[in-house]
Image: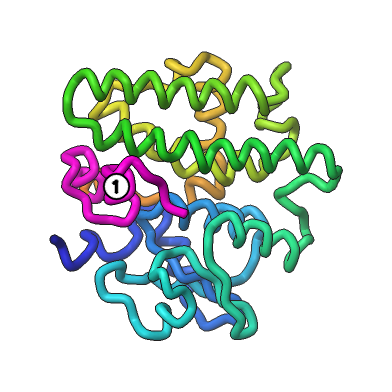
Amino acid sequence: MPDKIDPPHATGAAEDTVKKHSQPHDLVFHAGWFCPFVQRVWIALEEKGLKYEYREVNPYQKEPHFLAINPKGLVPALEHHDKALYESLVLLEYLDDAFPSPRSLRPTDPHELGLVRLAVQHISNVVVPAFYRYVQAQEPEKQRDGHDAFVAALRDVQAQWFVGEGAPWARGDHFGWVEAVLGPWVARFALLEQHRGFSASDVGDEFAMWAQRVLERPSVKATSSLPENYESVYRRYFEDTAESEVAKATRKGEWLK
């Protein structure tokens, strides 16, 4: 079992973003550059244009202070005025509550917000587990099944919660929670293309165009490391030798609670 992530820090555009947020601040973002759950929150921080301090957490050598913040030892976590929270979806809620301006990533209309929450729940409970089952599948038949299940899960998101009709983003004209929650896995589609033959166009042309817009969004670019560095981390998933909590749960047919 490795005792470090290689490289130990963000690279490319994400490294530049880290440097811009290296000074002490009362909003502290405890993160891991490689983690898609971290990137959800990081995208939101960048979209909202907030000042914050970025702190990289070594997943294999967690400091006592971080474990006091989150006993699970999992990133992401936030400290704001010395009060801490964790779990990516909770943190997205918190950022919109604590920093409603210059704009919220979630809608203000109650019904629209309910629809977005349904989409986010589906992404977290169906799409993301399907991604890891697909990635960790070893036998060709299981890989085919994984592909079909992942595509079906993404098609469900598009069919049920994308407004369509030429809208640039899932719910219309504004980049929002659906993009922040699913965007980190869109940023990892290239790994699936290389190792499993997946393409966003397998879901559909409109979805593929939406995915490309997500990749070109400044907040997504600013929080993404170089492709070869994701490759070095995810190789263990494609070989099904990863020992992360996500990987272990996937092998058991479970999902992180």
Which residue: 51% across, 26% down?
154
Of the pair 92 and 117, the residue shown nearer to us:
117
Work out which residue is located at the far left of the displayed protein and give it.
Answer: 1
Q: Where 53 sits versus 213, above or below?
A: below
Where, by quadrant of the figure, is residue 67 drawn? bottom left
Q: Where 114 sits versus 222, above or below?
A: above
Which residue: 47% across, 61% down?
17
Secondary structure under badge 1?
helix
Q: Which residues are magenta?
A: 233-257
Q: Position of residue 49 (x, y in %)?
A: 65, 60
Q: Position of residue 114 (x, y in %)?
A: 76, 41
Which residue: 59% across, 27% down?
157
10 Å crowding of disc 1: few (<14), some (14-19), many (20+): many
Q: Is residue 220 left or right of residue 7?
A: right
Q: Position of residue 27 (x, y in %)?
A: 60, 76
Of the pair 22 and 119, the residue shown nearer to us:
119
Quadrant for the N terminus in the image: bottom left
Q: Is residue 230 left or right of residue 201?
A: left
Q: Which residue is mark 1?
A: 230
The residue type indicated by label 1 comes to Tyr
Q: Is residue 214 left or right of residue 102?
A: left
